[in-house]
Image (cartoon, rainbow, N blue to C red):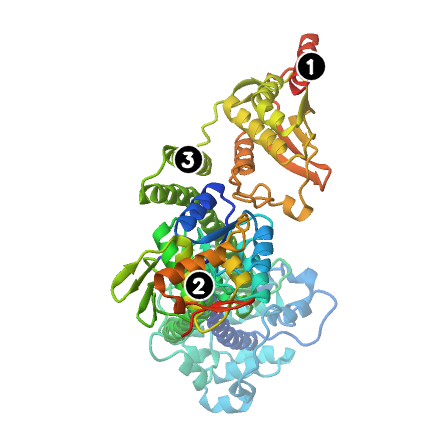
Amino acid sequence: MRVLIVEDEPDLQRVVWTCLQEEGYVVDAASDGEEGLYKAANWDYDVIVLDVMLPKLDGWQVLARLRKLKATPVLMLTARDTVHDRVKGLDAGADDYLVKPFQLAELLARLRALIRRAAGQSQPVIEIGDTHIDTVSRTVTRIGSLIPLTAMEYSLVELLALHRGKLVTRSMIYDKLYDEDDDTLSNLVDVHVSNIRRKLGHEFITTRRGQGYMIND
Amino acid sequence: MIKSLRWRLQLWHALLLTTVLIIFGGVVYALQWQTRLQQADAELDRVASVLTSRLRGLFPVPRSPNPGPWRPPNRGPGSSRPPEQTEDRGSPLIADALLPANVPLPVPPPWLIARPRDDQQQEDQSDARRRENRGPSRGGSRDGNREEGNRSGRNEQARDGQRGGPPEPPRDGSAGPRDSTRDQAGRWFSPAPGLGLPDEFNHLFEGDEHSFYFIIWDRNGTVLEKSKSVEEIPFPDLHTQADGLPVRQARMRDMQREVIHVSRFEINVLVGRSLVPDLSALHRNAFRLILTGLGVLSIGLAGGWWFSSRAIRPIAEMSAIAESISVKNLSTRINVSSTATELEQLGTVLNRTFDRLQSAFERQGQFTADASHELRTPVAVILSHAELALSRPRAVGDYQNTIQACRRAALRMKTLIDSLLLLARFDSGEPEIELRPVELDRLAVDAIEMLQPLADERHVKLSCRAEALTIDADHDRLFQVLTNLLSNAIRYNKPEGRVDVDVTSDEQSAIIRVVDSGVGIPTDELQHVFNRFYRVDKARTTAEGGCGLGLSICQTIVDAHHGSISAFSELHVGTTIEVRLPLAQNSSQPGVPSEASDKADTATSLTAASGR
């Protein structure tokens, strides 16, 4: 899952960035409105964390311009918590709203909910046959027994599971699973896929040669 | 309740109305009284005229006017006395004088006109005399008169004297040839019918105590004739005027109205009447007047009440609206178009006040929101860093980073809180400035020295041109202003830019200018730069540091010094902030002492040196 943080307070940006990364997200960061809008428009993020008070372009402007381009879920971060501000935020196209100061756990929960909703999945646990993917605890179980997966492997499983029945292209996988600074070689995806197959069975992931991967519904 | 405007209005209204009514009633009463008096006078005059004309009939005047002094054709022995006044006037004048000039002769009553014939039947034993009196006066008749008269010759003499000669004032009881004649005058004249008054006329003098009465005195005060009812009245002793014109006098005696006519022979004819019936009629009228007045008063008060209700209703509406305006409902305004002009003005003024109130509230709300926003961000940093650090075991470096981030956030909060407290203290009106002589040039140099490291870091050159100038100011606060301005000028400068600090003065003020060569401020934003939490560059990065309160604080401090602060800017050229502070009494004259200018030079070179 790839997340963009647009936050101008460096310390806050850093802590959110670290936290999300530790949770297995791929995190990009922007320090002002213009940069944030640029990144949001040019990459497909699963969710964007957008501060309201930003230099150059404020959060409302970024949101308004972004909504003309794409429907990426946006979570607004703001210090203002009046009803008026919330209504304004939600009306402007924000998908959720979080008031500073916030707890990181709440931020994570809201982000997960946003990602699930965007994928048309309302339950936090995705069931594929006898395999259960818990997006909250980021674990995969098969018939009650925990399957040990690395963070990258889990992310790949979750990505494919959220888009199950649909083809997930390699570039999409790169977009979602690797941040902009990552220079990992592309064939590492194949490595992760073969590791997953080893743990969950070969038929769990279908390969469309030259195009990408998918999990059959 | 009595304190309410409406009741006061009503009270004044009632007072005014009552006063007007009382005055009006009083005037009406007086006019009525006067009219009554005039009527009474007219009646009395009429009666008196009748009496006078009776007297005239008794003492007829010869018809033919003689240019010379008139002599009666038959002079009795009593008339041997020479006429006194008439001689020079001539008798026609006397005849004229019989008609009182100042009193319009009343229309003679019908019985008077019809008299010559009617009365004859009624006349008593004095018929002949009266007929003679009444009849056209003829010179010849006088002789007959005298002969026929069964009265004493004295009467005739008296008559002669009266008729032909100038009246000799009778001196009662005093010596004089004619005194004796008057002894019988009362008998001669009395009773009333003796004057030949008709019955109807006599009726006037009969009846109750309020009817007419009369008394006729001769010139000596001897009562010649009087009506029955009259009591003793002192002799008025009036005389004709010097030119013989008759005299009329009206007077009040207790409740009696009396008119005294003095005409020929200075016979005083007093006719009186009690005014008691008039007075009671007047009192009845007055009672009606009071009743009417009360009616008018109540109608006026009701009208006044209605008017005051009408007038006050908009005020009541206004106060209701003003009452309804609260923090939660600041946007309500008085409907100005529906009120009267004066109230419209009041409504407009109130609306403007409400506008100011609303904007003050909005500013306050904005300020609070901004302040809380500014505080929330560092709190968010501290909380999330702590949360993240505690979520799992970390390396020592991670903890250090976390603690440093927390410290930065806490410092930022401290700065913000300090600024807010400072502003709040100034807002609440305890400026806490301590005025002492401050050397502005020294202050500028100190500030530059303090910010030199920041300037070096940004590659900005600082310079100072300062006159030696001492004013009364709060050193620490002023220093804060200067460092704020300088750090702004350095932060928002271009690389390799310059910041100049000028300290000069004019007649009234010391002027501190901080001129930078920075990016400048757009004109439309320039007016907001002193607003709290306003940031031209919305950046909140710690690198640029500010929370948007710096210039507000500067302004607050300068205001507390009764100075002024203003900003001028040109985009991409630079910004100038100018602070003007009033010169203190003991401020040194700029540039005059050589020592001071030396010092200024030193300062300039010093900053130039440190700027390098």
> For this rendering, which residue is in front, A32 or B220?
A32
Cα distance, mark 2 to mark 3?
33 Å
Q: In the displayed structure, does residue A168 sit left or right of residue A102?
A: right
Task: Look at mark 2 in the image and give the residue it sits on.
Answer: A159
Q: Residue B605 got which mark?
A: 1
Furthest residue toward left: A144
Picture coordinates of residue B354 (x, y %)? 49, 56
- Picture coordinates of residue B397, whole percent (x, y): 40, 33
Q: Where is residue B150 in the image (x, y as percent from the top left)?
A: 47, 78
Quickly name the residue at label 3.
B401
Label 1 SS: helix
Up/down of B33 relative to B108, above or below:
above
Work out whether residue B328 or residue B602 is closer to the camera in this orientation and state it.
Answer: B602
Tell me the amino acid under the disc marked 2.
Answer: Leu
Q: What residue type is labelled 1?
A: Ser
Note whether residue A164 is visible: yes
Quarter of the figure that contains the C terminus of chain A: bottom left
> Can you tell which of label 1 and label 3 is closer to the viewer?
3
Kindly indicate the quadrant of the structure image that contains residue B481: top right
At x 57%, y 46%, the residue is B538
Query: On the same chain: label 1 and label 2?
Result: no
Query: Which image quarter: residue B438?
Result: top right
Viewer-nearest residue: B346 or B603? B603
Height in image: B202 above or below B429? below
